[in-house]
Image (tube, coloured by chain):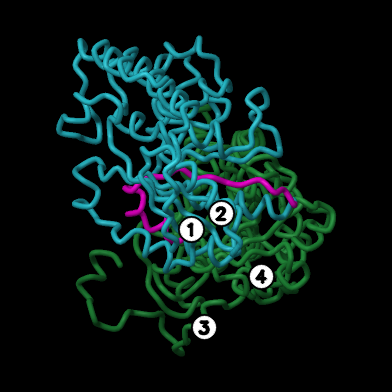
């Protein structure tokens, strides 16, 4: 809630014109029109990774069904630990298992990991550089339940934590690709998760795309605008780019699934080519996320293109139907395209 | 809950001497810095002597030996006491004693795993040790490793909600390889711990959480040794807790008599006096 909206306390919220949509179940999948979807890519990828790596175990804090970890729990029940609704225990026990040589994948919602369990992640896991993989559903604005479940500042929180690798995957292929790579990574990882039926986006635009930990990859070339995006906002950027192409505006999209450490060389090279408006896009508050990370990188390296940021406002967001909320906060392809057009 | 009433055997003098040596090393470290959590160190010395010279299966020359019993120091500020015990046990060389708390030392004021051999975890953010212990106990069971996990914690940490999350988890997962050691010195930063946020009745709490629990005088070595033995021998598949009632500054009567605080102030000229007083009480 913003101070402005406080003035509307107990009054109906203003939604866009048209039919009124209903808030879907909290666990609603992010289903995008026009893309094929895959069921529970994280759960299935973890099963495959665990078959190859006996160190992998799975833990959750009463959210296995809502993080797709139930697929792993059913396939490998003896390697699954239900820790109950106890996030401090989840993270400290994951640290203990890592100390004994295991590679724990610990799941919960992003709000609970970043807000409630932060000290345990900081001291028991990150300071000890233990290979705990924290995989969290409901990142940013992917639920209509309001601020209690909307992790709009998790990237900012974890970017400040030394040793933490941060991943915001775009689609089912990113998720399936990242699981074995983060399992093999020797340090702690925080990964945002899209769960349920997850779209396959990137290979439609770039058939040979494969997730590579730590790497930013050009998905689409274009000479007028460079969008640097992460998470599902890469999907929205690609869809916006298609809309803008119809107007003769050529938009390049650089997908940055690894938010920390940033692929600084690729970002500097692409942003430094000159002549293009640079726009960052993320499913996160504009405070402390990808946009500010890119801005600092460019400025400290003397690269100064025209620069804009698309993200969520510095506010507690409204509750409602997810499509409505994406309209309100400007995350739809049409609204992304409109803003870019306005900046040119 | 089990009441442990060990038979009054003759004092175990070799352990008493170990405890005295731990106190003396801790005092010497305090003298180097002119400060330190010496009250806690003197109070817990008997428990550490029983742990490292009676209960724990460990190899001083190989502190990372896979078969070792793990001893976690959740209370990072007790590091001065654990360093003394690790030196007495031969894990740390005594030559490093005078580096305590100095730049470039392997013995920082608050214990950290990456600095010190034998320091299993980074404690200090209180309320984390027991949860880490739960994970390590689960891990040992996965590996079929019969070692025990000991977690030394304070009565103040019983105020942290995470302690009770871990207590529930340990019982739920039937972690009979986990032994919580609670130093109940009834002192925390602002006041007596029972005045700040009372954990009493502490044994009833642990019992209600599904733990086997004992409460003994933590400065009575025979009682401490018997409690360790009982805790390991419990047949029920449950975690075990030993609550040790200890006295801050134990072994240095003029400090014991002082109004005890969390951070006991010792004047510069008093370190030598404290060592002299301790020496007068050296066990045979």
Chain B's shade in the image? cyan
Between disc 2 and disc 1, whose residue precedes? Answer: 2
Q: Which residue is mark 3?
A: A24
Query: Residue A201, position in %: x, y?
Result: 72, 64
Badges 1 and 4, same chain: no
Q: Which residue is mark 4?
A: A68
Labels 3 and 1 touching (C-beta < 8 A): no
Residue numbers of the magenta segment: B144-165
Q: Is residue B42 left or right of residue B224?
A: left
Q: Which residue is mark 2?
A: B134
* Location of residue A249 with respect to A321 vertically, above or below: above
Between disc 4 and disc 3, whose residue precedes? Answer: 3
Labels 2 and 3 touching (C-beta < 8 A): no
Badges 2 and 4, same chain: no
Labels 2 and 1 touching (C-beta < 8 A): yes
Of the pair A230 and B130, the residue shown nearer to us: B130
Q: Is residue A213 left or right of residue B233?
A: right
Query: Residue B158, position in %: x, y?
Result: 35, 53
Image quadrant of residue A278? top right
Instruction: Identify the residue at horizontal 56%, vertical 39% (top origin).
Output: B55
Q: Circle 4: is it few (<14), some (14-19), or many (20+) Cα within 10 Å?
A: many
Of the pair B229 and A147, the residue shown nearer to us: B229
């Amino acid at each position: 809630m913003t101070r402005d909206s406080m003035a509307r306390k107990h009054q109906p919220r203003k939604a866009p014109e048209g039919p009124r949509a209903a808030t879907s179940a909290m666990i609603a999948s992010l289903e995008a029109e026009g893309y094929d979807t895959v069921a529970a890519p994280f759960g299935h990828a973890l099963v495959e990774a665990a078959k190859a790596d006996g160190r992998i175990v799975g833990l959750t804090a009463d959210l296995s069904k809502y993080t797709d970890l139930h697929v792993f729990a059913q396939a490998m029940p003896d390697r699954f630990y239900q820790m109950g609704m106890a996030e401090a225990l989840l993270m400290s026990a994951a640290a203990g298992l890592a100390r004994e040589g295991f590679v724990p994948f610990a799941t919960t919602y992003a709000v609970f990991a970043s807000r409630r369990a932060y000290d345990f992640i900081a001291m028991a896991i990150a300071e000890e550089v233990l290979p705990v993989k924290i995989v969290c559903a409901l990142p940013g604005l992917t639920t209509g339940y309001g601020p209690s479940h909307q992790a709009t500042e998790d990237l900012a929180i974890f970017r400040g934590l030394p040793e933490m690798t941060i991943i915001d995957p775009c689609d089912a292929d990113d998720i399936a690709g990242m699981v074995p790579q983060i399992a093999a990574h020797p340090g702690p990882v925080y990964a945002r998760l899209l769960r349920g039926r997850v779209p396959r986006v990137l290979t439609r635009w770039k058939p040979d795309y494969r997730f590579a930990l730590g790497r930013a990859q050009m998905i689409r070339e274009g000479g007028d605008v460079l969008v640097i995006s992460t998470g599902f906002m890469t999907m929205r950027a690609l869809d916006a780019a298609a809309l803008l192409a119809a107007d003769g505006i050529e938009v390049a999209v650089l997908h940055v699934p690894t938010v920390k450490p940033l692929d600084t060389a690729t970002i500097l090279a692409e942003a430094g080519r000159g002549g293009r408006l640079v726009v960052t896009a993320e499913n996160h508050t504009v405070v402390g996320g990808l946009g500010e990370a890119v801005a600092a990188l460019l400025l400290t390296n003397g690269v100064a293109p025209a620069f804009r940021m698309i993200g969520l406002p510095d506010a507690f967001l409204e509750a409602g139907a997810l499509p409505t909320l994406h309209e309100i906060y400007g995350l739809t392809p049409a609204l992304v395209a409109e803003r870019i057009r306005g900046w040119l | 809950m089990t009441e442990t009433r060990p038979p009054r055997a003759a004092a175990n003098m070799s352990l008493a001497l170990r405890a005295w040596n731990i106190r003396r090393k801790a005092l010497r470290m305090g003298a180097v810095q002119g400060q330190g959590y010496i009250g806690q160190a003197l109070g817990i010395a008997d428990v550490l002597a029983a742990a490292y010279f009676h209960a724990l299966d460990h190899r001083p020359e190989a502190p990372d030996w896979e078969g070792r019993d793990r001893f976690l120091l959740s209370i990072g500020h007790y590091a001065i006491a654990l360093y003394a015990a690790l030196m007495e046990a031969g894990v740390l060389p005594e030559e490093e004693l005078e580096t305590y708390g100095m730049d470039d030392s392997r013995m920082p004021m608050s214990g950290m795993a990456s600095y010190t051999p034998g320091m299993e975890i980074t404690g200090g953010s209180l309320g984390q040790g027991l949860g880490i212990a739960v994970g390590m106990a689960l891990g040992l069971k996965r590996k079929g490793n019969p070692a025990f996990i000991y977690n030394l914690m304070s009565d103040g940490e019983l105020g942290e909600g995470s302690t009770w999350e871990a207590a529930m988890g340990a019982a739920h997962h039937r972690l009979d390889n986990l032994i919580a050691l609670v130093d109940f010195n009834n002192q925390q930063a602002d006041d007596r711990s029972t005045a700040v946020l009372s954990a009493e009745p502490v044994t009833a709490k642990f019992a209600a959480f599904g733990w086997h629990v004992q409460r003994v005088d933590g400065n009575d070595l025979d009682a401490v040794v018997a409690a360790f033995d009982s805790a390991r021998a419990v047949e029920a598949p449950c975690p075990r807790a030993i609550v040790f009632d200890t006295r801050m500054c134990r072994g240095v009567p003029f400090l014991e008599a002082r109004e005890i605080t969390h951070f006991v102030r010792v004047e510069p000229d008093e370190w030598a006096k404290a060592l002299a007083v301790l020496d007068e009480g050296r066990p045979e």
